[in-house]
Every structure is written in structure tokens, then in C-alpha cells.
Image (cartoon, rainbow, N blue to C red):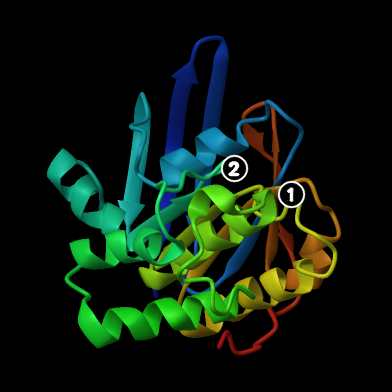
Amino acid sequence: MDPLLTLKDIVFRRGDFTLQIDRLELQPGQVYLLQGPNGSGKTTLLQLLALLLTPASGEVCYAGAPVTASRERQRLRQQVTLVEQSPFLFSTSVYRNLAFGLRLRDVRGDAQRRRIAQVLKAVGLDGFECRQANALSGGEIRRVALARALALHPRMLLLDEPTAGLDREVLPIFEQCLAALPAQGTTVVIAGHDADQHRRLGGTALHLERGRLAPTIPGVVPRQDVCA
């Protein structure tokens, strides 16, 4: 089976910073924990994986095929979802925030309502459909952003510091949902600083230092909890 996404001989420059990835293969249905100090390039790497940035040199392959044309990038972006460190929500209800992307994919009516209810329950926000986004706490905003991403059924989910600031009682719910995604066919890449998260979620640890990846660290098989 081909890797879902491959970076080969990638060089990306932003000001004085250079991200250089000799080779990175992300397999379908796996969890990857991307760690490294601030300024190491984690967010930049996530944006490259999300096909939001074009490297100065090197090759990006999706499902074994090189990604070259901008039209192809736009099409594939519907299969890859990035949840940023400070996610943006529209100043409207939680339901409308989640429905926006679904409407663009022509998911409407009962199917839309069922999917939104399902993902809100998965992130521990059952019944939040009518809540206003501007009245949510920081942790609730992060969970709504995750639910919005999950509702799109992405093949690859990229998360930038998703658990920062979450309450202790919420963290197990959040991580249980993430750990279940590979069994549903989703590749998950989580950037963060929590060294224990690798042991809790399993998968493969990736360490980024000054724009370069260290050798990967195989982990345990991810848990197979069902994300209801």
C-alpha cells in the first residue's frame, strides 16, 4: 500500500528559517505525534502536509502520485483538514459553524444534522448546537474546531497543539476520540509538547529540531476505541 502522503527532498524557506525534510512517509490509518521546541518548524510542516504551502524544492506525493498543479492541490485539500493552534469560529451558533463545510460538500438536511450531533457527542459537547461560538471557553472552542474537522470525514487530520489548555477531565475524552480515528481510516498528525501523549495514543513519534526531522520512534498500536 502506498503512503497517504510523502515528502521527498523538501526545502521550504521563510525568512531566516529553513525547513528541510529528506523523506517523510505518512501511512494510511496511523497516528503521528510531532514534537519539538518552539521555532523548530512544527506549524510550517503541518501547513506543508495540508498542501497550504508550496516548497521551494522537492516533491509532495499524495496516494503515490506527485502533487504539482494548483488545481490538484485544491481538490486534495478537501481530503486533508488542518485544525490550527488558535482555531477561528464564525460569530454564530456552533451548529452553523459545523454546517458550513458540510454544505460545501453537499451534506444537507437530516444527514447534516445527524453528522453534527455525532461529532459533537464524540468531543464531549453533546447538545451544544445552539450555543453561540463567541460565548464558548477556550477549551470548548478547540473541541468545536475538532468536531468541525471530524464532520468532514478527512483522510488526514492535522492538529496543531490541540490539547493545550484543555481541562484535565476533558483531555481523556478528546484523546479517546483521536485514538479511535485510525480504525476509521483517518491518518492523524498531532503537533504538541506533551511527551506523555505518545504513550497514551500510541503511533509514531516524530521529533523536529531546527527544521530537520530526527529518526522516527515506533510506538505501540493505537487503541481501537470507537468514537461515537
**Of residues 120 and 226, the one drawn nearer to the viewer in this rendering:** 120
Residue that sits furthest to the top in the current view: 16
Instruction: Identify which residue is drawn at 48% across, 61% down.
Output: 157
Asked if residue 69 shows in the view, the reply is no
x, y percent for residue 112: 29, 79
- The circle drawn on residue 204 is none
Left or right: where does residue 41 sit relative to residue 56?
right
Q: Quadrant of the N terminus?
A: bottom left
> Circle 2 sits on which residue?
85
Counting every numbered tag in the picture gives 2
Q: Looking at the image, do the residues carrying marks 1 and 2 touch, with CB atoms under 8 Å apart?
A: yes
> Circle 1 sits on which residue?
164
Q: Amino acid at mark 1?
A: Ala
Q: Is residue 224 above or below residue 91?
A: below
Q: Earlier in the sequence, mark 1 or mark 2?
A: 2
Instruction: Identify which residue is drawn at 43% across, 40% down.
Output: 48
Q: Is residue 6 above or below residue 171?
A: above
Left or right: where does residue 187 sit relative to residue 215?
left
Asked if residue 165 shows in the view, the reply is yes
**Element class at badge 2:** loop
Q: Is residue 31 above or below residue 55?
A: below
Q: Is residue 209 above or below residue 226?
A: above
**Of residues 201 and 103, the one drawn nearer to the viewer in this rendering:** 103
Q: Amino acid at mark 2?
A: Gln
x, y percent for residue 153: 38, 72
x, y percent for residue 91: 42, 46
